[in-house]
Image: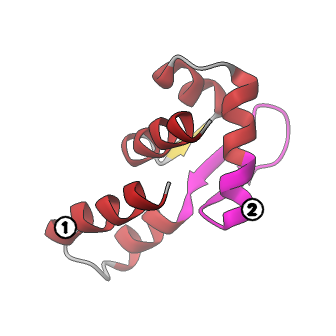
Amino acid sequence: MRDTAHVVLKSLFQIPVFSINQISSATEKSYNTISSIITHFIDLGWVLPLIKKRNKIYRFDIYLQLLEKDLIPYEELSKFKDKIDKKV
């Protein structure tokens, strides 16, 4: 599961606003596996649901907050990503 979580996390950098189906297709992992991992990321505060009805849409919140507030120059984002990669 840890390797799959790492793959999912990498895909969130590419698709920061997403549905479970999008990430499932992008990673070629089952819907239930992705749903479980996204639930864990929500518990960590990394991901937030945007639409809480059927066909939920989520946002990779910690990443988008950095981009939206421009707290970290674009060149530094890869360092941030590398730190997360080491923690997952």
Quick check: is 75 in the magenta stretch?
Answer: no
- Disc 1: CA contacts within 10 A as few (<14), some (14-19) or many (>=20): few
Tell me the tag on residue 74: 1
According to the picture, the residue beneath numbered tag 2 turns out to be 43
Image location of residue 39, percent across then percent down: 75, 48
Image location of residue 32, percent across then percent down: 76, 26
Tell me where the magenta segment starts and ends, as one range. Answer: 39-61
User: Which of labels 2 and 1 is toward the front?
Assistant: 2
Quick check: is 57 in the magenta stretch?
Answer: yes
Asked if residue 60 is positioned above or below residue 77 in the image, the reply reads above
Name the side, left or right, on which 18 lies relative to 77. right
Asked if residue 43 is positioned above or below residue 37 in the image, the reply reads below
| Quadrant location of the N terminus in the rendered image | top right
Is disc 1 placed on a helix, strand or loop? helix
In the current view of this chain or complex, which residue is farthest to the left?
A: 75
Q: Depth check: give the residue in front, 85 or 74.
A: 85
User: Mark 1: which amino acid?
Assistant: Tyr
Name the side, left or right, on which 83 lies relative to 19. left
Residue at x 43% of width, y 38% of height: 11
Q: How many marks?
A: 2
Disc 2 + disc 1, Cβ < 8 Å:
no
User: Mark 2: which amino acid?
Assistant: Asp
Q: Depth check: give the residue in front, 55 or 86.
A: 86
Asked if residue 37 is positioned above or below residue 42 in the image, the reply reads above
- Disc 2: CA contacts within 10 A as few (<14), some (14-19) or many (>=20): few
**Quadrant location of residue 85?**
bottom left
Image location of residue 86, percent across then percent down: 39, 59
